[in-house]
Image (tube, rainbow, N blue to C red):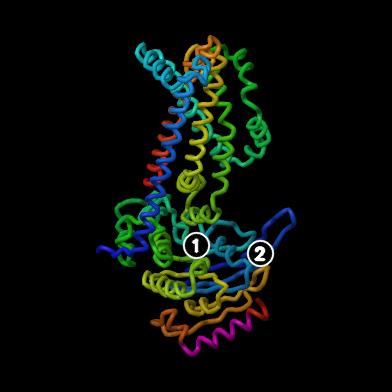
Amino acid sequence: MSTALSLENISYSYHTVQGETCALKDISLDIPKGSFVSVVGPSGCGKSTLLSIIAGIIRPDSGRILINGRDISPGNDSIGYMLQHDHLFEWRSIYGNVMLGLEIKRRKNPDGISYVDELLKRYGLGEFKASRPSELSGGMRQRAALIRTLALEPEILLLDEPFSALDYQTRLTVCDDIYSIIKNEHKTAVLVTHDLSEAISVGDTVYVLSRRPGRIARSVSVDFPADMTPLMRRNAPEFKDYFNILWKELNENG
Amino acid sequence: MDKIISQSQLRYLKNRKRQHSCIIIMRTLILVLLIGGWELCADIGILNSFVFSSPSRIIRCFTGMAGTGIIWKHLWVTVYETLICFSIVIAAGMLCAMLMWRFRMVFKVAEPYIVLLNSLPKSALAPVLIVWLGNNVKTIIVAAVSVAIFGAVLSIYTAFIETDPEKIKLIRTLGGKRRHILTKLVIPSSIPTIINTMKVNLGLSLVGVIIGEFLAADSGLGYLIIYGSQIFKMDWVLMSIVILCILSGVLYKLINILEKKAGHSG
């Protein structure tokens, strides 16, 4: 399988009056096309920073980021980012919200519009186009946020703890929901989370980041049948074994 | 489908309605008592109507002046000056706030001066402005703008910089530049603060215009008040004050309508 995203020796430090803090050190990974990768680590280990670097929001001090073997160019559309909260704008309708990326990129043309319409319909939000975000449930809001990201047709999706703001029950169903949409759209995805179960339930590979400065402490391949949803994985007997391996790793190196 | 409403819910709704009517009745009663009491006291001589005027004298005075059209001229001058001043304050306030949001350095440099000018009693500037700009409308507008502008800049800028950084990150993840952050997020999310600033500044503009008219005018309600008091025409003074009350109420209502419209659009 070809590589969708490669990170080569990424390091990043940030500066405050108190001093310099090394957030990430020598991160290298290859993510195959169409795979779902989870990154776990203790809070403050630089997980979100890593995603911001991949998305091009912050520039690393050193290292390279390659998408399909080419250096990342500023303002490219091949990466979509989903944040912890849906951040739907209350002053816009759901339709206005999912169109935001297309407006910014000046791609609100008939093709873009019909693609978004299709996504809204396919994922059950067709009838809620005119609704305000506050009229939707937490799960529907998160789905709208994903459609806003998908509207720009990115190849790679970065998910920054997108379920952590939801209550536990909603979280499990929304995770299932979002996972199936991403698989359905054949996207490559990178999820960062501090929740081990979540990481195992969606990931093909789980990377463990160490405490600051974040380094890749270990990668664990997770092998479940392809048709298993995250909820089904949680009930599979191997789930516990993966959990124990990662738990041990996090306690020793995380 | 019709919902069946329980007795307790009905009682609750009825209670709420009663409370609402009670508030309206009390409000009206206060106004009626105030006007009636004033009229009565003037009639039976408790208040000297030459000094304190009376509602009936004010109405007579108003109809007289409305007949000749003179009151409309004064009213229009004040409204016109207030609207010009208000427009300048809001436009300049927005522009300065945007500039300072874009170039934080500008705010850091200007902050102590803006804070200082904001707390300076602006009426102290009025005599200086008369000398510099002359006894004319320019002085009134500049004086009135100076009353409101600094506070407006500070409150709009504060709203701008309080925009949720995670939402800014969202715009950037969608490939947005600074101008997108400003137009798609910062300004729309600051609309409630901008409208509140407008409410405050409409009042302040009126205050500024009246101060200006006290000092440098030959027409307008402020002029009528100061001139009336000088020649002891208290009917003019009190009528002008009543008109000012109504005027500020009407202007406030207009902003409320705008607020409702802003709330429904987007």
The residue located at (51%, 79%) in the rendering is: A200
* Front residue of A20 and B241: B241
Q: Which of the labelled discs sits on residue A23, or is there none?
A: 2
Residue mark closest to the camera, 1 vs 2: 1
Please provide percent x and percent y for residue A97.
40, 55
Which residues are the magenta region?
A236-249
Mark 1 chain: A
**Which comes sooner in the sequence, label 1 or label 2?**
2
Q: As displayed, is residue B7 above or below residue B109?
A: below
Kindly tell me whether residue B138 is visible in this rendering. Answer: no
Question: Could you say whether the residue bearing mark 1 is in a helix, strand or loop?
Answer: loop
Q: Circle 1 sits on which residue?
A: A85
In the picture, measured across the screen, residue B113 lies left or right of residue A156, that is right
The residue located at (42%, 85%) in the rendering is: A225
The amino acid type, in three-letter code, at marker 1 is His
Please provide percent x and percent y for residue B69.
37, 13
Please provide percent x and percent y for residue B227.
52, 12
In the picture, measured across the screen, residue B101 lies left or right of residue B61, that is right
Badge 2 crowding class, 10 Å Cα cut-off, few under 14, some 14 to 19, many 20 or more, is: many
* Front residue of B45 and A29: B45
Question: Could you say whether the residue bearing mark 2 is in a helix, strand or loop?
Answer: strand
Which of the image's four quarters has the N terminus of chain B?
bottom left
The amino acid type, in three-letter code, at marker 2 is Ala
Prevailing SS of the magenta stretch: helix
